[in-house]
Amino acid sequence: MSKAYSEKTEETIKPPLTSVGVIGWIKANLLNSWFNSLLTVATLYLLLKIIPAFIRWAFVDSLWMSTGAECHQAGGACWSIIPANLRFILFGFFPYDLQWRPLVAMILLVGLLFYSQNRNHWKKSLAYLWIFGLFIMGLLMKGGLFGLTSVESAQWGGLPLTLILSVFGLTAAYPLGVVLALGRQSKMPAIKTICVIYIELIRGVPLISLLFMSSVVFPLFLPEGITVNKIVRAQAAIILFTAAYIAEVVRGGLQGMSRGQYEAAESLGLNYYQTMRLVILPQALKIVIPPTVSILISAFKDTSLVVIIALYDLLKTTQSVLSDPEWMGFSSEAYLFIALIYFVCCFAMSNYSRRLERELDTGH
Amino acid sequence: MNEEQIEKPATVDDDDIIIEIINMHKWFGDFHVLKDINLIVRKQERIVICGPSGSGKSTLIRCINRLEEHQRGRIIVDNIELIDNIKNIEKIRTEVGMVFQHFNLFPHLTIVENLALGPIWVRKVPKKEAEETAMYFLEKVHIAEQAQKYPGQLSGGQQQRVAIARSLCMHPKVMLFDEPTSALDPEMIKEVLDVMIDLAREGMTMIVVSHEMGFAKSVAHKVLFMDYGQIVEENAPEEFFENPQHERTKLFLSQILH
């Protein structure tokens, strides 16, 4: 009896049609005041103007597999610039016949990154796997052993260079930044002063000037006959720069820790390093995952600044293609393409960081 | 509250001294928090310290495991003097367990990991053995079924019992309690006090900063009253509550006992 009754009320008590479903959503979000209604209409008008034109340019009138000359005749997008120059954009001046080597190296790197995403794989064996993987990658890029032709690092370029600069830059900068943050919190005045000076100095100059210094000024101080590889110098500049920013973010996390956590760890008899490693850092670093990832993402994009010291990273190889008379004028297409590559990488990073945050959440 | 009297060893000889504080002073900047403190604690002795807030009682027990540094006088714990030697300090901290007002469990570790952390890294106990010890003490504080949860999922009373078990896992010779029940909701105070009474029954040496006068009456050998950084009165609980000697003690007792 009561069941029938409740079934009946459920049916009769349904909310008014205009407050649920599509209509309800539109009413609540798009037309909930005269100002918002105006904005909705204006936005719709703009979208109607832009989207069909973009689709026409990008898809309808576009050419995908043509020569540059044909492209100049047509009115739409010239996507042909990408397949026609893909190998140069991706690999730069790496000897044409040997370009399978950087390709394999990149696949290896991406595969390792993918494998390392899973926290269940974070064991000692993973470190050995990385050491082995890095050795193979180095071998593929550099050659000179096991019958592989040697390739000068000056010929490296394109995507492998971008990935090398970012992956090593970020993985080295992170621990260095943590150490600097701990140093800045240190009770020992000398260590504290050194860390403060370092962080403030590095943060006070733009990355471009650091890259210039590493490529132009630094070699002047080296004794004659000794040279340091240009990529290594740029890499060092990126690491030192990013570390200073990470240090400040991590310091914020350390300050967010309550004194009670230190006291509890200390009263168990844990020493300073154990306290930091087992109690403080796991919590502090977790708190600062979002700002840390912001820094890592912007550092990844900043690696494109190495064009300034004539390293042929992804951006520079694309620019070179655009200076070829056959393909001149199709910069929108080319830049959209590398924007897509950058976006995929950055999106993967931010996606992963959100997953990590969820996994590490222990409900406090 | 368990009002029955727990057996208190009547006499103890001087070899049994575990903590000795002699003419100890401490300042926070210019502020003289502890003035000429003298205290002897013998093995298996249980001391309750009470007093108004800001009287220095928490600071006093925090000096015993060097969470605070004293500036004058001597503190000797288990025949080791607390001086500026980090090795000595770490040694003493392994012998002295501490329970805090706000529990201070490690929120990123499960309960059993919280308990096993100290033994594994400080005592170098194998992981498996440390976890077995952890389960033994969780059993003791009646909370074994929560072993795989995180601190954030437990109630305040449960967290404080876990905190007590965490200290016990180090097999300390002395346990310090810094207002262990004052951050708890009233209905959770009893479960924590019961665990402390069990501990007392087993002969643990305890120094407890607390205003739980029922606990003091049934468990303590000695009650200390502190005010303005001094130990004003020190007496057996019967005497202390029935017949307080100082005006300030009388005033304080009238305020908290209503």
Image (cartoon, coloured by chain):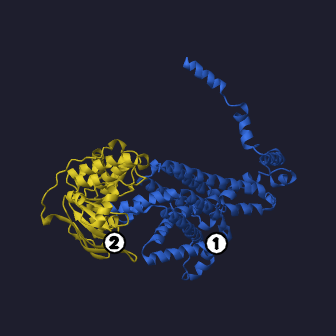
Residue type highlighted by circle 1: Pro
Which is nearer the eye, B71 or A203? Answer: B71
- Report the side of A241 relative to B51 (left or right): right
Colour given to chain B in the rendered image: yellow
* Chain letter tied to blue: A
Residue A243 in view (yes/no): yes
Which is nearer the eye, B150 or A169? Answer: B150
Quarter of the image for residue A318 reads: bottom right
Quadrant where the C terminus of chain B lies?
A: bottom left
Crowding at mark 2 (Cα within 10 Å: few <14, some 14-19, many 20+): some
Q: Measured from the top left, where is residue A26 in percent x and y?
A: 74, 39
State the residue position of label 1.
Answer: A206
Residue in the picture at 75% in, 43% down: A32
Q: Measured from the top left, where is residue B86 in percent x and y?
A: 31, 71
- Report the side of A8 relative to B95 (left or right): right
Query: Mark 2 — on which chain does it sit?
Result: B
In the rendered structure, find residue A135 and report the number of the disc placed on it: none
Q: Measured from the top left, where is residue B109 in percent x and y?
A: 40, 51
Query: Mark 1 — on which chain does it sit?
Result: A
